Image (tube, rainbow, N blue to C red):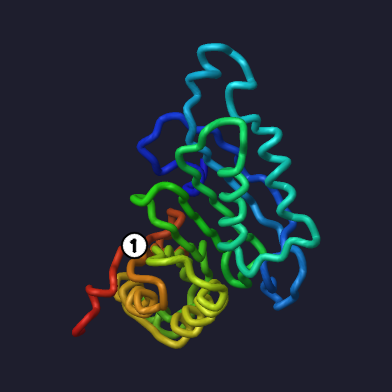
Amino acid sequence: MSKYDSPRSGHSDCISLSALTLRAHIGADCWDRDRPQPVLLTVHVFTSLLPAALSDDVTKTIHYGHLASALYDLEHPNRQFESLLHLAEAAADVVLRNPDAPVTQVRIIAEAPKLLLHAKSLVADINEHSPSAPDTICINALSLPIIIGVNPQERLLKQIVTTSISFYLVARPGPISEPKPVLFLHSDHISSISFLTLEAFVASVARVACFLDGCDLVSITAQKPSAVAFGVASGVSISRCRADFVGL
C-alpha cells in the first residue's frame, strides 16, 4: 500500500477503487504537449456497508463495476480538464452522483506520472464532505542535482537530492497556481543555491513554498541517496506554515 492509498477519515465503512488508469486531457505534459496523459485514479467512497453485510445483496451497496465505468467516462476525448486538480474534482462529482447508496464522504487521489519532467509524479488529493481533511497537491520525488554537504568533494560536485513537497490548499486554485509554475519555481530555487545540511535546505524550500498563492502550510521531505554507503538514503522531513517565516 502506498502513502496515497490510506483513507484519512473517522468513518470505518469504505469502498475503494485503486489505481484506475485513465487517458485524460489535463493540460500540457512535461514536454509542453497538449495531449492525453496517463492518470492513476484512486477513489475512497465512505458509505454504510451494513445493508449489504446483513443481506449479502449486491443491490444494497455501491456497484463498483458501474462506478468504475462512470469514472472511465472522464477520459472521453471531448472532456477537457484545466489541471489534474480539476479532474479530481470531476471524479468526486461522479461519485457523489452515484445512485446506488448514500455517500457520506469521498476522497480522490489523482496521480499524473508524466506531467512533471524531473519528478516521479504530481498528485492531487481532495476530500468532499470532510472539512477536517485538507486538500493537497504533492510534487512527488522531485530529483535535482545540487551542492550540499560538508565534505570537500560535496562542495565541488553536485549530488541528487530527492524532494517531495505537499501543499495544503487554503482554497482550490485555478490552473495558473498548479502545477508547473510551482515546479519551475522550486527547480530554479533548488538548483541555484548550495547548503551544508538538509535541514537548512528544506527550510529554504519551505520558505518559498509557504508564500505561494492559495497555500499556507507545506510538508517537505528531502533525501540524499548518496549520503549513506550501506543504506538507501538519509533524509529529513518538516512541516511549516507562512507564520513561521514572518519577520525572519
In this orientation, does residue 150 appear? Answer: no
Q: Nearer the viewer, residue 7 or 171?
A: 171
Q: Nearer the viewer, residue 189 or 94?
A: 94
User: Residue at position x 71%, y 58% from top?
Assistant: 38
Q: Nearer the viewer, residue 31 or 34?
A: 34
Image quadrant in which you'd find residue 96:
top right
The amino acid marked with disc number 1 is Val
Q: Nearer the viewer, residue 153 or 247?
A: 247
Residue furthest toward the left?
Answer: 247
User: Residue at position x 74%, y 49% from top?
Assistant: 73
**24 w.r.t. 68: above or below:** below
In this orientation, does residue 152 appear? Answer: yes
The reply, left or right, for residue 125 in relation to residue 120 is: left
Residue 144, percent from left and from top: 52, 74
Instruction: Give the labeled residue for mark 1.
Output: 236
The reply, left or right, for residue 222 in relation to residue 45 is: left
Residue furthest toward the top?
Answer: 55
- Secondary structure at badge 1 equals strand
The reply, left or right, for residue 244 in relation to residue 110 is: left
Residue 153, percent from left and from top: 42, 80
Residue furthest toward the bottom?
Answer: 192
Is the residue marked by circle 1 packed among few (<14), some (14-19), or many (20+) residues within 10 Å?
Answer: some
Residue 4, percent from left and from top: 50, 48
Task: Say how many tags the image has.
Answer: 1
Residue 8, percent from left and from top: 40, 43
Q: Quadrant of the C terminus?
A: bottom left
**234 w.r.t. 44: above or below:** below
Image quadrant in which you'd find residue 25:
bottom right
User: Residue at position x 44%, y 83% from top?
Assistant: 189
